[in-house]
Image: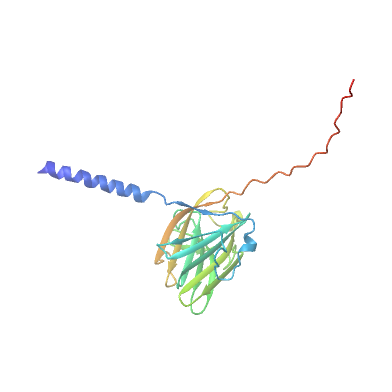
Amino acid sequence: MSNLKHLTTIPFLALLSLATFLFAQPSDTLLMPYDPEMEDLVDIDGTIEPDEYPESFYDEPTLVTVAWGCDDSLIYVGLKAPKCAWLAIGFGSAKREGSNLIIGTITEDSIGIGNYLGTKDGYKLIGGEEDYIVEWEIDEEEDTVTMEFIYPMNFPAESGMTVTKLEHGKVYNFTLGMSKKVAPKGKEERRSFGVFEIEEKPPLKEEVTPQESLPVKKEEKK
């Protein structure tokens, strides 16, 4: 009887190990495209137009649609979600702790956005209410909330962030969060994590200086 029990346990353990291996694998790496004309393409007005951003995707766990791109020194992000009171995206860490978090809050009395550092227990505000956020807008419709912002890729060392630089050609983790209510720290209703690459800038084209044509010496006929 013990031998039969042992034999039936082996396939179960094998399947369990396989499932653990599969679910532990990182998801596909998403691309944040580079476009030097992002400033002219994106209008930070709380509305995401078709083809306004060079790339977009839908995140099923959080129900959030993400649109984004970057230029030489800034990233441009748009988030659209079902009507909610708390909407966030973070860069630089595989978990909330250590991420640069941009959190938008929507209440009956106010709408705001802040730059936060993810901590073990939740997050803490970095600098002032809008420090390090170049431009932003949040628009609340009957059924949806849209948040757009422009964010620098480099921060001063004294900013207090664990991730002070986002570089072209590098791969980073990101996190998304959404809550119907203003989330108590670390208790958002929906959360997910992913991996993205900031597209490398194309190499600069070398300017070719046209050479002056040299006179051709002709041989005289003998």
Looking at the image, the residue that sits furthest to the bottom is 109
Location of the N terminus (image quadrant): top left
Residue shown at 64% from the left, 56% from the top: 36
Instruction: Judge from the rendering whether residue 168 lies leftward or rightward of residue 86; answer left or right.
Output: right
In the image, residue 51 above or below residue 157:
below
Residue 161: x percent and y percent? 54, 56
Instruction: Judge from the rendering whether residue 72 lies leftward or rightward of residue 123; answer left or right.
Output: right
Please tell me how many numbered marks the rendered image carries.
0
Residue 145: x percent and y percent? 49, 72
Viewer-closest of 93 and 46: 46
Instruction: Judge from the rendering whether residue 16 lies leftward or rightward of residue 6; answer left or right.
Output: right
Looking at the image, the residue that sits furthest to the top is 222
Residue 174: x percent and y percent? 48, 56
Colouring convention used in this rendered image of the protein: rainbow
Residue shown at 64% from the left, 62% from the top: 39
Looking at the image, the residue that sits furthest to the left is 1
Looking at the image, the residue that sits furthest to the front is 222
Instruction: Judge from the rendering whether residue 206 lies leftward or rightward of residue 48; answer left or right.
Output: right
Viewer-closest of 5 and 143: 143
In the image, residue 14 above or below residue 53:
above
Location of the C terminus (image quadrant): top right
Viewer-closest of 174 and 77: 77
Query: Residue 206, located in which quarter of the rendered image?
Result: top right
Residue 70: x percent and y percent? 59, 57
